[in-house]
Image (cartoon, rainbow, N blue to C red):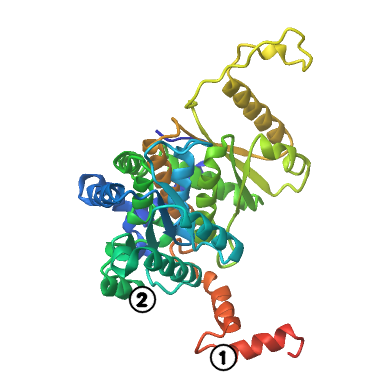
Amino acid sequence: MIKVDASPSGKYLDRAIEAFDVLYGRKGAGCDYTGWIDLPSAVHGPLPSECMSVVDRWRSMGVETVAVIGIGGSYLGAKAAIEALSHSFVRGAGRMHVVFAGFNLSEEYHAELMDYLESSSVAVVVISKSGTTTEPAVAFRIIKEFMERRYGRKGAAERIVAITDASKGALRAEAENEGYVTFVIPDNVGGRYSVLTPVGLLPVAAAGFDISALLSGAAAAAGQCGTRSADNPAVRYAAARNELYDAGKKVEILVTYNPKMQYFAEWWKQLFGESEGKDGKGLFPASAGFTTDLHSLGQYIQDGGRFIFETVLGASASGRDLVIGGSSDNLDGMGFLAGRHMEYCNRMAALATRIAHQDGGVPNLSVEFDRIDEYCLGELFYFFEAACGISAYMLGVNPFDQPGVEAYKKNMYALLGKPGYEKEGERLRALLHGKV
């Protein structure tokens, strides 16, 4: 169960409940993209078994590595779940290694990825509604060529799955031409809300984790966050962050004390950044991993500009036990901790930091979940999606569009020489050379 430690005023709770009504009544801006609200019900449908049938087939083929190609919401949710659930240093025996491509345009990154794939038995998941987004399209060209060279065109087609639009787009056409197995990205679900569709579920299943448990956790959170109440954790979180925003706090730092949650924070940043950052409004979503970043950002957070607040995301129970040993000479002065669990030290560090930062004028909220497992991650994904929708409607923006993302794309197409962008390319090159 998700627990939110926040004390928003009654005024903001009332506003949050009004925004809840807009979201769950599906009557706000962008309401055509609220299909994610219903996704947890897929736990009772065929989707989990359909994903597992692909995974089982790959296992029978001896696949060792699955390359997932996508950008933004097409990779961050899966990456967040896999990083959180995986051993930090050892890949589980018998589990396929899921790697990611097409979320950047770095030549070095992709060349090194190809080096790695050369020595492995590979399958591919390519994710794009349109099939024309530059980063994943370029990566897929490179990886598809490799797959066909190694396995032949027919053999490659048996190892490639496309997750795309139901009926249109370049990737849909290519998948039908080549005979790829396909999954559909629902029309009413935007990319950053798609982790509970095949976009997230298939890669997580390929990594060897329980997607039915993930959906079950999301279903539990849907019940909790779909209740019209001031005790609803999504309502309380949305109310508190908007009250702090109106009080002059412009940056929210999502703080985690477990490095397994680093990519969950990256997913959270995209969710809130793309949903709220428009019309000159919105909190800037940042993240930090404590205690590590207390030795780099801690000074600024403690004594710098007072436009920050923190939301501490943490599990109430550790997944492992590790006890600090004794020492006869006690040269490090840490003998007083002998016999203590390392997580005890982590919790005391979190408590000490919260007190220090609050004393320094940095408000703290907290979001607590039970443990890092599939069920609880499903809860977290749904909770933050619901809270984001409520919070954005409180702010007065459409949670489900991203008009600002298109600006760089148009410039990039023009500078790359994409047909149809010639005049804009000339203008930009002249601008860059000081001729405008």
Disc 1 residue crowd, few under 14, some 14–19, many 20+, Cα 10 Å? some
At numbered mark 1, what does the secondary structure look like: helix, strand or loop?
helix
Q: Position of residue 249 (x, y in %)?
A: 65, 50
Q: State the image coordinates of residue 420 (x, y, percent, origin top left).
A: 50, 89
Q: Can residue 164 be seen by looking at this rendering? A: no
What whole-number distance in Å separates the C-alpha atoms at marks 1 and 2?
Answer: 22 Å
- With respect to residue 163, does 58 lie above or below? above
Nearer the observer, 430 or 315? 430
Left or right: residue 377 versus residue 12 is: left
Q: Nearer the viewer, residue 46 or 395?
A: 46
Upstream in sequence: badge 1 or badge 2: 2
For residue 221, above or below residue 274: above
Q: Is residue 87 visible?
A: yes
Q: Answer left or right for 315 relative to 336.
A: left
Task: State the quadrant of the C terminus.
Answer: bottom right
Mark 2 crowd level (few <14, some 14–19, many ≥20, 10 Å Cα) = some
Give the SS element for disc 2. Answer: helix
Residue tagged by mark 2? 170
Please give the residue where the numbered disc 1 appears in the rendered image: 422
Residue at coordinates 49% horizontally, 72% vertically from top-left? Answer: 134
Residue 342: image quadrant is top right
The answer to which of 324 and 280 lies nearer the viewer is: 324
Question: Which residue does the image show at 36% across and 37% down from the upper left?
Answer: 375
Find out whether the residues at labels 1 and 2 contact each other: C-beta distance under 8 Å. Answer: no
What amino acid type should be assigned to the residue bearing mark 1? Glu
Q: Nearer the viewer, residue 202 or 252?
A: 202
